[in-house]
C-alpha cells in the first residue's frame, strides 16, 4: 500500500514525523490523499472497515496539512486547522472535525480518540503503518491502553487524577455505558476510586518531535 510505505519512510518508531523529508515527497503524499478521496464507503462495508478507512484518512490529512504549512512550531498556528474544509470526499470538501464528529463519533467507539494524530506533544502517538479492519479491535485496545498509562499524558492515582484534555473535550463519548472513571479503569494500571478528584491537564499543542 502506498500509504503504508509512506508512513514507514516518514514516521519513526516513536511516532515522530520527519516533516523535512515529507516536504521532499509532497507529490507522493498528495497522491495518497487523492486516492483516499476516490473511495466512498457504502452500506456493504463493515463498521470496522468504515472506522479503519476514516482513521487512515484523518491521519494522512493531518500530516498533509501540517506539511503544507511547515515549518511551524504548532498546528495551532494554522487558522482553524480542524474546522478547515480541505479534504476531498464525495464531491465536496470536509474538515478533520467532520470526520470525527459526523462520521466516527456516531459509531460509538471512544477508543478512536487514541489513534487520531493531532501532531501535538499531547496527541496520541502516530503509528508508522496504516490500520487494517481485521486487526482494528486489537489496535484500538493497544492504543487506548498505551495512551491512558502514559504518565506524560495522564497522571493517575487512586484518589486524584490529572487527565488529558481529550477526555474533557469528548466526555460524553466516554460515558456511553458507564462513567469516565469506569472507562479508564478498564485500561489503567492503577484503579481509580469512584470518588477520586478529576482534573484535566493543559493540552500541549507544540509539534511532537
Image (tube, rainbow, N blue to C red):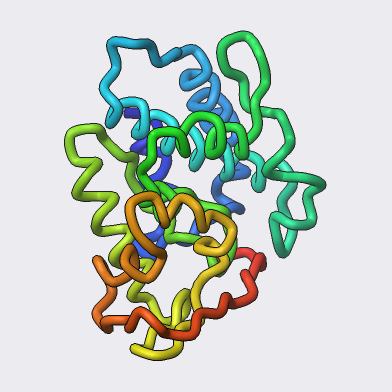
Q: Residue at x 32, y 28 (%)?
A: 1
Judge whether 197 appears above or below 90 on screen.
below
Q: Nearer the viewer, residue 161 or 52?
A: 161
Residue at 47%, 39% (x, y): give it: 105
In the figure, 11 relative to 22: above or below? below
Q: Is residue 116 visible?
A: yes
- In this picture, residue 81 sits left or right of residue 88: right
> How many marks are shown on the rendered structure?
0
169, 176: nearer the viewer: 176
User: Residue 49: image x %, image y %?
Assistant: 30, 26
Residue drawn at the location 38% of the way across and 29% of the way down? 53
Residue 132 in percent (x, y) is at 26, 35
Q: Quadrant of the C terminus?
A: bottom right
Toward the viewer: 182 or 105?
Answer: 182
Residue 51 percent across, percent down from the top left: 36, 33
Residue 11 visible in rendering: no
Tell me the quarter of the picture where residue 50 sits. top left
Q: Nearer the viewer, residue 76 or 184?
A: 184
User: Which residue shows up at 42% across the image and 38% down it?
Assistant: 55
Indicate whether 64 appears above or below 181.
above
Image quarter for residue 137? top left
> x, y percentage for residue 13?
34, 61
Compared across the picture, whether 104 is left or right of 144 comes to right
**Rendered position, 145 above or below 192:** above
From the viewer's perspective, tell me whether residue 102 is left or right of residue 175. right
Amino acid at each position: 500500500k502506498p500509504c503504508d510505505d509512506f508512513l514507514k519512510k516518514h514516521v519513526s518508531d516513536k511516532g515522530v514525523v520527519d516533516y523535512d523529508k515529507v516536504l521532499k515527497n509532497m507529490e507522493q503524499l498528495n497522491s495518497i490523499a487523492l486516492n483516499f478521496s476516490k473511495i466512498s464507503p457504502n452500506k456493504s462495508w463493515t463498521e470496522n472497515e468504515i472506522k479503519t478507512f476514516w482513521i487512515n484518512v484523518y491521519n494522512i490529512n493531518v500530516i498533509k496539512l501540517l506539511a503544507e504549512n511547515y515549518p511551524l512550531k504548532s498546528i495551532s498556528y494554522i487558522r482553524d486547522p480542524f474546522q478547515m474544509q480541505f479534504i476531498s470526499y464525495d464531491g465536496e470538501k470536509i474538515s478533520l472535525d467532520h470526520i470525527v464528529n459526523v462520521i466516527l463519533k456516531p459509531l460509538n467507539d471512544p477508543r478512536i480518540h487514541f489513534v487520531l494524530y493531532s501532531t501535538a506533544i499531547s496527541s496520541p502517538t502516530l503509528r508508522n503503518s496504516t490500520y487494517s479492519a481485521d486487526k482494528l479491535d486489537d489496535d484500538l485496545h493497544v492504543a487506548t491502553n498505551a495512551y491512558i498509562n502514559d504518565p506524560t499524558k495522564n497522571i493517575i492515582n487512586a484518589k486524584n487524577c490529572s487527565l488529558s484534555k481529550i477526555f474533557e473535550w469528548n466526555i460524553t463519548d466516554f460515558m456511553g455505558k458507564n462513567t469516565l472513571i469506569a472507562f479508564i479503569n478498564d485500561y489503567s494500571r492503577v484503579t481509580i476510586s469512584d470518588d477520586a478528584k478529576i482534573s484535566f491537564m493543559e493540552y500541549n499543542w507544540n509539534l511532537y518531535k
